[in-house]
């Protein structure tokens, strides 16, 4: 991050702010300080995390937060929204320019909310007068499975086809624990059992059989590019709306790493995203869409969203302005290049990767050959100061809780300035940990899926080696908290 940052002035300002907070609730001030210390001293490899710029972070702590502004720009249900109009308009302007999108709706509070807005907008745009009351809907918490199917029938029993969870899809793409799995009759496509890659012929076959209203593309844990031009052809053939959830890879779209067939914006009817992952903005969501969906998308609040968060929309505007700088394209390319180095560094040291590589910002390790679960790997890596998350691999015998996989990504450490040599060293350190884990047994004598022993000295050795690299790339350099 190359923003003007007067370290002494910023340190004084942060220390003052923390004193104000501590005077009311010292525990919270302590947690804020501790979080900075933790983030500074660990190798953050969580694929969905990043470090927002000082400008983005500073935009969030202010009085824009105190204003109610339900409605849309210039058309609010509250008086006095001129400043919220300004920030929302600025964020939308940067979003449409950055992504070359006809329309942007920047109110969603998160990625899940952005998807909900998109689902309701597609239903509203595609389905005529759904008669909810006629379906005898009672309080939503009391709905049984039968009620939900009654509700779906009122909407014409609409169908969604998305990537299966274990192939790397997201919960909001029609799975039971999420509202999308209740609203829609869902079916999913997976990946080729041999290569781990998306099989477009299989997606087309399933789409022809299932005839979804929504064909959804996008993922949380698929380490490859998706050809959105092909997905659109499939959607058009079966009369589906193509919705792309680019939450994970929005930074690679913004940074022009994913172009042409791999850029979702010109191909999808509706594209949703988070703003805090590879895009490096504040926690939040956004919907980008073709003009025919714009009116329905703009009804997100109050249809499914609470009042917009003025401070977060302002921070989205700042982060999107940053992403329009040429340096963001260099960053995005470095994220992708570093992911290749990390993947190759792991593979040459014997680690099995899902799809044997990566084409985006993430790498999915299959740790089963070490005789451990993803959960044991995640915990042992954390003991050594490497922050990752366990993740199911396709057809995972250990299920979604223990898993056989670990998902890692390069957006955060690339923001910190890590380059190819350092990512290769990160791969080496990860292998040092993975190869030093011994699972323990449960009280019944069976191998534990959670407990393990990490060989003596490994955590300290890895932490010391990481500290050398982290010290060369300080986070918010010069910012000293008391
Ligand atoms: N969509 C995808 C593909 C995601 O990976 C995620 C989060 O991990 C989300 C949506 C949800 O984002 P949020 O946590 O901001 O609601």
Image (cartoon, helix red, strand yellow):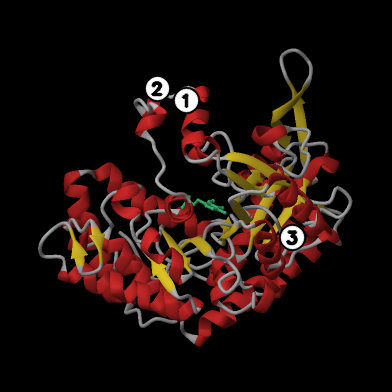
2 vs 1, front mark: 1
Quarter where residue 451 is shown: top right
In the image, residue 437 sits, relative to residue 362, either above or below, namely: above
| Numbered marks: total | 3
Q: Badge 3: few (under 14), some or many (20 or more) residues near its Cα, within 10 Å?
A: many
- On residue 147, which mark appears? 1
Quarter where residue 90 is shown: bottom left
Q: Alpha carbon of mark 2 to alpha carbon of mark 3: how far?
A: 49 Å
Quarter where residue 43 is shown: bottom right
2 vs 3, front mark: 2
Asked if the residue at tag 1 contacts the one at tag 3, i.e. Cβ–Cβ closer than 8 Å, the answer is no
Question: Of residues 19 and 86, which is closer to you in this image?
Answer: 86
Closer to the chain start, of discs 3 and 1, is 1
**Which residue occupies 65% across, 63% down?**
236
3 vs 1, front mark: 1
Q: Which residue is mark 3?
A: 427
Q: Which residue is mark 2?
A: 142
Residue 477: tell me if it is visible. Answer: no
Question: Of residues 332 and 106, which is closer to you in this image?
Answer: 106
Q: Alpha carbon of mark 2 to alpha carbon of mark 1: how far?
A: 9 Å
In the image, residue 374 sits, relative to residue 34, either above or below, namely: above
Q: Secondary structure at mark 3?
A: helix
The answer to whether residue 71 is left or right of residue 277 is left
Closer to the chain start, of discs 2 and 1, is 2
Q: Badge 2: few (under 14), some or many (20 or more) residues near its Cα, within 10 Å?
A: few
Measured from the top left, where is residue 185 in percent x and y?
Answer: 59, 38
Confirm or reject: label 2 Cβ below 8 Å from ligand 1: no
In the image, residue 17 sits, relative to residue 156, either above or below, namely: below
Q: Quadrant of the C terminus?
A: bottom left
Asked if the residue at tag 1 contacts the one at tag 2, i.e. Cβ–Cβ closer than 8 Å, the answer is yes
């Amino acid at each position: 991050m190359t923003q003007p940052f007067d370290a002494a002035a910023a340190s004084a300002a942060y220390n003052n702010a923390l004193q104000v907070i501590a005077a009311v609730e010292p525990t919270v001030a302590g947690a804020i300080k501790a979080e900075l210390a933790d983030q500074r001293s660990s190798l953050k490899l969580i694929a969905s995390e990043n470090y927002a710029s000082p400008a983005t972070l500073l935009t969030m702590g202010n009085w824009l937060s105190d204003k109610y502004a339900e409605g849309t720009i210039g058309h609010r249900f509250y008086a006095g929204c001129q400043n919220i109009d300004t920030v929302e308009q600025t964020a939308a302007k940067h979003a449409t320019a950055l992504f070359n999108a006809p329309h942007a709706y920047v109110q969603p509070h998160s990625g899940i909310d952005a998807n909900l807005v998109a689902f309701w907008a597609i239903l509203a745009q595609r389905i005529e007068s759904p008669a909810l009351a006629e379906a005898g809907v009672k309080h939503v918490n009391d709905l049984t499975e039968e009620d939900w199917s009654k509700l779906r029938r009122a909407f014409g029993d609409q169908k969604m086809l998305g990537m299966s969870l274990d192939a790397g899809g997201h919960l909001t793409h029609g799975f039971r624990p999420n509202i999308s799995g209740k609203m829609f009759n869902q079916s999913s496509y997976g990946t080729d059992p041999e290569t781990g890659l998306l099989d477009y012929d299989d997606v087309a076959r399933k789409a022809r059989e299932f005839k979804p209203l929504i064909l959804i593309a996008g993922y949380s844990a698929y380490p490859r590019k998706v050809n959105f031009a092909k997905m659109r052809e499939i959607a058009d053939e079966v009369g589906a709306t193509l919705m792309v959830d680019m939450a994970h890879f929005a930074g690679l779209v913004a940074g022009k790493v994913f172009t042409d067939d791999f850029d979702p914006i010109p191909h999808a009817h509706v594209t949703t995203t988070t703003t805090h992952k590879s895009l490096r903005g504040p926690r939040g969501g956004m919907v980008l869409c073709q003009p025919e969906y714009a009116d329905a998308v703009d009804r997100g609040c109050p249809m499914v969203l609470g009042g917009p968060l003025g401070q977060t929309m302002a921070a989205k505007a700042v982060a999107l302005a940053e992403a329009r700088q040429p340096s963001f394209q260099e960053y995005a390319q470095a994220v992708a290049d570093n992911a290749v180095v990390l993947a190759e560094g792991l593979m040459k040291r014997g680690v099995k990767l899902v799809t044997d590589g990566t084409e985006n910002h993430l790498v999915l390790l299959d740790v089963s050959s070490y005789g451990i679960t993803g959960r044991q790997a995640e915990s042992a890596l954390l003991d050594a100061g490497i922050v990752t998350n366990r993740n199911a691999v396709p057809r995972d015998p250990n299920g979604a809780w223990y898993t056989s996989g670990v998902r890692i990504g390069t957006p955060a450490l690339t923001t910190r300035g890590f380059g190819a040599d350092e990512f290769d060293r990160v791969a080496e350190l990860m292998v040092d940990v993975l190869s030093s884990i011994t699972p323990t047994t449960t009280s019944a004598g069976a191998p534990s899926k959670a407990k393990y022993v990490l060989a003596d000295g490994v955590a300290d050795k890895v932490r010391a080696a990481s500290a050398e690299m982290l010290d060369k790339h300080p986070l918010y350099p010069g910012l000293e908290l008391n």
